[in-house]
Image (cartoon, rainbow, N blue to C red):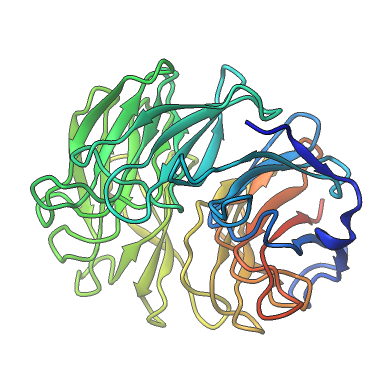
Amino acid sequence: MPACRQFLNLSAVIVASLVAASAWASPLDSYESRRFGACKHACNSRTGVVSLPDGSVIGTTYRGGKDGLGVVYSIGSDRKTLTVLHEFASEEGYRPGGLVLASDGMLYGVLAPEPGCGGGIFRMAIDGSRYEQLHTFRCDEGRPTIEAVPIEGPDGAIYATPQVNNGRRGCGTVVKMTKNGKVTVLHEFNGNSDGCLPNVGLAAASTGDLYGTTSFGGAFGQGTLYRISRSGDYELLRSFGIDDGETKAAYPHAPLTERGGMLYGMLNSGSAHGLGTVFKVDYDGQNYEEVHPFSAEGADSRTQLLLARDGSLYGTTLNGGTRSEGNLFSISPTDVFSKLHSFGVRKDGRKPWGALVQLPDGTLAGTTELGGGGVGYGSRAVYWYTPTP
């Protein structure tokens, strides 16, 4: 692998901007972004970043780099110094999805093929060294996408949800990988009976089980919520549907988040305004409750809600807001919804795909797929948001 490239002259690579928080936010809140200004280095991402103990962050892009297939990058705790840790080469043939920082101190990520079968799981050190592809997916195991984010289970294994495979229905799988690269298919989705297209990741609950959603399939063909054990015991807990008398909403496109004995998630269609809703259910998929129906303040969420240290949940929407470029919002410990920031200022970033993380100092960090400013839509941006104490 070529040596890491550090860009100390940032004028051509990152444009610094301190953007005032929107009128929705408290004056004590602050929002700051760093835009990637040169696509030849790194641009476009649909996944968030991982946080390191020193306050720096590491993420991926699916474009940029020497062969245009994306990079793994880091931004230092100064929020200015960008380092390209790994450039994906044409001989590798894949683009990176999301990352997880595992308990062994290594980064694990998925690789997405374009198009067809393949893809895989890779591992590397946080300084960019020791990169290796641990597994290449067979067609029957599934094909990850650039939105996919793996997780580490309580057993130390890596779990992922490739969305398409060449099995019975081509609806995707749940896979488990040991740290030495041994992959087991835990479940193959087959359509209406148990769901189809298992979204972008799983959630490991305190019960020891894994929970996930599918975007389609189920009784109404509009998505499901499921539970799966680490040994592969699968249980369909709920089917979503606009015509379902209880949920009246459908199409989940984000992983679940556990808080206070409940699982929180988001649906992208239906509910009171037709734009989806934030919901919560218990561990058995019962006691469904609508937390907040989306309206003009935002719609189409693709990111997992972050449970922050203040007990609030934080998330984003791709659309809506004052500029129709997405919003940042919070849900208090008592389920009160608040709008915090509207994306789309010239150097602000647009379309916040990546899930938020909380840094050691309490700041939240996330990503936008598009950078904003310049010619067209720009390349992408990493942003930091400081909530009111």
- The mark total stands at 0
Front-lying residue, 364 or 25: 364
Residue 235 in view = yes
Front-lying residue, 137 or 345: 137
Front-lying residue, 57 or 307: 57
384 above or below 98? Answer: below
Residue drawn 41% across the image and 82% down it:
273
Displayed quadrant of residue 233: top left
Q: Where is residue 325 drawn, in percent x and y?
A: 61, 77
241 above or below 286? Answer: below
Residue 308 in view = no
Q: Where is residue 94 drawn, in percent x and y?
A: 44, 46
Residue drawn 56% across the image and 79% down it:
320
Answer with left or right where residue 133 lies relative to residue 15: left
293 above or below 84? Answer: below
Answer with left or right where residue 226 lies relative to residue 304: left
Quarter of the image with the N terminus in it: top right
Residue drawn 67% across the image and 28% down it:
126
Answer with left or right where residue 354 lies relative to residue 115: right
Q: Which residue ends up furthest to the front in the rendered image?
A: 91
Displayed quadrant of residue 297: bottom right
Q: Where is residue 163 drawn, in percent x and y?
A: 29, 50
Answer with left or right where residue 290 lies relative to residue 363: left
Q: Where is residue 249 drawn, in percent x and y?
A: 31, 70
Front-lying residue, 372 or 227: 372
